[in-house]
């Protein structure tokens, strides 16, 4: 069965960077895009971008251009989200998600809480 | 960007009720629409994609319809485990966008 297991919660100060990982199992990691979506406390869902694990190609939401980098390590079937120059409004749960279907988000990781606070 | 607007933002219902949630896109998205259920502290769960195709394992009390700009999610007979927040999402173009959510609460 498809499983996406994310790294644990992180606390950072404003201006710092954070890396979140997402380890995939139960399917062909290089077969489907991996998306990242975040959710601020009490708020809705916000798409951040995707990476093609096969080629390494990426597509980022304009809002995050210049601050976000998505990478992958196919040897470990793991995708990574790096976010730099963190601000307090980056405090959110960050999810990875993928889809064998024609949609984007059939399967989700459990989420990683990132707290940005001085 | 395509704006997704859900209505209502919240609703109160009883076990056994039929519930309908509406999602409107700011421009046509064909049938490139998904619905998700989210419970507190949990990741969203995919219910429906391509506007009306049920994800594997999702009970048939959930159904979706619509095309173009107007879509609906219907729960035929609300059960205790269905009290949650529901989101629609378009995957017709980038950036991907979600509705603001509809919270289904106990009456």
Image (cartoon, coloured by chain):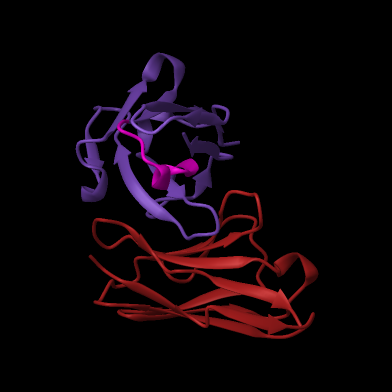
Chain colours: A purple, B red
Kindly indicate the quadrant of the structure image that contains residue B94. Answer: bottom left
Assess whether residue A92 is covered by the magenta stretch.
Answer: yes
Query: Is B24 placed above or below A47 here?
Result: below
Badge count:
0
Q: Residue A84 location, x and y as percent?
A: 31, 31
Q: Residue at x 43, y 70 (%)?
A: B51
On the picture, is B50 further left or further right than A63? right
Q: Which residue: 24% across, 77% down?
A: B27
Query: In the rendered view, would you say B25 is above or below A23?
Result: below
Residue A48 in picture, x, y percent from top left: 33, 46
Name the image quarter holding the N terminus of chain A.
top right
Q: Which residues are magenta?
A: A84-96
Q: Nearer the viewer, residue A38 or B56?
A: A38
Q: Is B46 one of the magenta-colored residues?
A: no
Q: With respect to residue B60, does A9 lie above or below?
A: above
Q: Residue at x 25, y 76 (%)?
A: B28
Residue A1 to residue A89: above or below: above
Q: Is residue B92 left or right of residue B20?
A: left
The answer to which image quadrant residue A70 occupies is top left
Q: Position of residue B78 (x, y in %)?
A: 73, 77
Residue at the outermost front position: A118
Residue A26 image offset from top left, x and y in percent: 55, 30
């Amino acid at each position: 069965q498809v499983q996406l297991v994310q790294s644990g919660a992180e606390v950072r100060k404003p201006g710092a960077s954070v890396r979140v990982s997402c380890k995939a199992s139960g399917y062909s990691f290089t077969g489907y895009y991996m998306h990242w979506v975040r959710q601020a406390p009490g708020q809705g869902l916000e798409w951040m971008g995707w990476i093609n694990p096969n080629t390494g190609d990426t597509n980022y939401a304009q809002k995050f251009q210049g601050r976000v980098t998505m990478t992958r390590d196919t040897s470990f079937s793991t995708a990574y989200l790096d976010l730099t120059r963190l601000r307090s409004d980056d405090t959110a749960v960050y999810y990875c998600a993928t889809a064998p279907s024609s949609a984007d988000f059939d399967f989700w990781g459990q989420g990683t809480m990132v707290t940005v606070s001085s | 960007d395509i704006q997704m607007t859900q209505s209502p933002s919240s609703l109160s219902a009883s076990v056994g009720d039929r519930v309908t949630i509406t999602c409107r896109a700011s421009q046509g998205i064909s049938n490139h629409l998904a619905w998700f259920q989210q419970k507190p502290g949990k990741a969203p769960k995919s219910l429906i994609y391509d506007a009306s195709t049920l994800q594997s394992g999702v009970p048939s009390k959930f159904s979706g319809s619509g095309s173009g700009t107007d879509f609906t999610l219907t729960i035929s007979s609300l059960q205790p485990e269905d009290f949650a927040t529901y989101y629609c999402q378009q995957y017709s173009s980038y950036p991907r966008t979600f509705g603001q959510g509809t919270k289904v609460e106990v009456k």
